[in-house]
Amino acid sequence: MNIRFLLLIATFAIIPTCVMAEGCDVQTQSSSASVPAVETHSCYEYEGMPVSSIDWSCSNESKDMLNSKKTKVEHCADHYQATCIATITQESLANPHSTSKDKNAKALNIPDNAQVTTYYYDVEHLAQARIDCENGGGHWKTK
């Protein structure tokens, strides 16, 4: 059999299980002046997760008083103000702000090295975003 053909088959057999970063760009605005949005533009990436695992959490949805527009991107942009890096949990697959305080916790079907990195671009209350990150077990870093 042709070696090129075998390499091609091997490549496509490996691709679905490759671990890559994928991002979700999020733009949020409040439906009411009395309900401020902490962050108005952010993006999050899953690292150490199977391809397309971000699809479910990166669907467009409207929360009661906050409207979010989500767009799947290959990578988050690098013009951020700060980042929050945290361990992925089963809950954070649906809500990227939900992370584990226990860095040694093991969740079913989530690789041991899986992380969610949230990049903050336009944040009304940067101090509150930091508190939320650290209270959720994340590691905050300003650029």
Image (cartoon, rainbow, N blue to C red):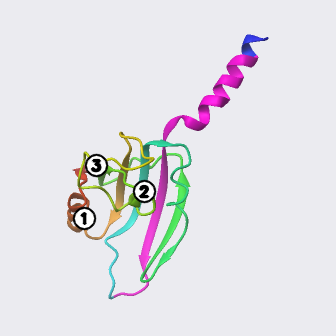
Q: Secondary structure at mark 1?
A: helix
**Is the Cβ of the residue at disc 3 closer than 8 Å to that at disc 2?**
no
The residues colored magenta run: 5-33
Q: Residue at x 25, y 47 (%)?
A: 103
Q: Residue at x 31, y 71 (%)?
A: 38
Q: Which mark is residue 105?
A: 3
Sequence-wise first label, 1 or 3: 3
Amino acid carrying mark 1 in the image: Asp
Label placed on residue 104: none
Q: Which residue is mark 1?
A: 132
- How many discs appear? 3
Where does the image place residue 21, in percent across and percent down from the top left?
47, 42
Whether 18 is drawn above or below 69: the answer is above
Pointer 1 and pointer 2: residues touching (CB < 8 Å)?
no
Q: Is residue 14 above or below residue 95?
A: above
Q: Which residue is mark 2?
A: 43
Question: CA–CA distance between discs 1 and 3?
Answer: 19 Å
16 left or right, relative to 83: right
Nearer to us in this view, 74 or 51: 51
Q: Is residue 69 above or below residue 64?
A: above
- Disc 2 crowd rating (10 Å Cα; few below 14, some 14-19, many 20+) is many
Q: Is residue 81 left or right of residue 77?
A: left
Residue 46: x %, y % from top left: 43, 48
| Comes first in the chain, label 3 or label 2 | 2
Rendering quarter of residue 133: bottom left
The residue positioned 32% from the left and 49% from the top of the image is 87
Element on which disc 2 rests: strand
Which residue lies most toward the right here? 1
Q: Amino acid at mark 2?
A: Cys
